Amino acid sequence: MAMVHAAVISDAEQDMKRTLKMLELPEKASNIGIKIATCDYRRSETGATTDPTVLDALIKTLRSKYSSCEIFVFENDASGTNAETLFRYLGIDEIAKRHDCRTVSLSKTDWVPKKIDGFHFKET
């Protein structure tokens, strides 16, 4: 876990660079997935959804380190929300486009079970 105090949101990019430097990220990556929080039709100021400014800073920082990797921003529909609508409402789709990323609604994709060594999940 890494934590950086950000005094103002305008410093998000600089703070994101500092945060990612604290992590032991691999030298190379071919795919990066970013799970955002869009649990409701509310703006980021409420704290209920991912802040687009922070997401923009994260993607920009990752893109500078991994220029040729594929970056996905993903979310699933919830009982009262639609991920694709929320991508547009929050401006996530524009951020993804600006940084050559893809938004993915998990409700529109096929799910493939994967075994993860060391972890045991009950299959349903």
Image (cartoon, rainbow, N blue to C red):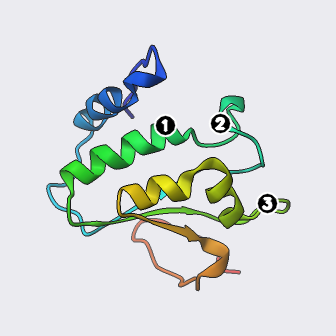
- Counting other residues with Cα less than 10 Å from the Cα at mark 1, is it few (<14), some (14-19), or many (20 or more)? some
- Left or right, 83 with respect to 109, comes to right
Residue type indicated by callout 2: Ser
Q: Position of residue 73 (x, y in %)?
A: 49, 60
Q: Is 123 placed above or below 58 here?
A: below
Compute the Cα span from label 2 to label 1: 9 Å
Q: Residue at x 40, y 26 (%)?
A: 3
Q: Which residue is mark 2?
A: 44
Residue type indicated by callout 1: Thr
Compute the Cα span from label 2 to label 3: 15 Å
Q: Which residue is mark 1?
A: 53
Q: Position of residue 78 (x, y in %)?
A: 77, 62
Direction top: furthest residue: 7
Q: Position of residue 119 (x, y in %)?
A: 48, 65
Label drawn at residue 81: 3
Q: Position of residue 55 (x, y in %)?
A: 46, 44
Give the SS element for disc 2: helix
Q: Residue at x 29, y 44 (%)?
A: 61
Label drawn at residue 43: none
- Which tag, 1 or 3, sits closer to the chain's start? 1
Q: Residue at x 47, y 24 (%)?
A: 9
- Counting other residues with Cα less than 10 Å from the Cα at mark 3, is it few (<14), some (14-19), or many (20 or more)? some
Locate residue 1: give its quadrant: top left
Asked if the residues shown at circle 2 and circle 1 are in contact, with their CB atoms under 8 angstroms apart, the answer is yes
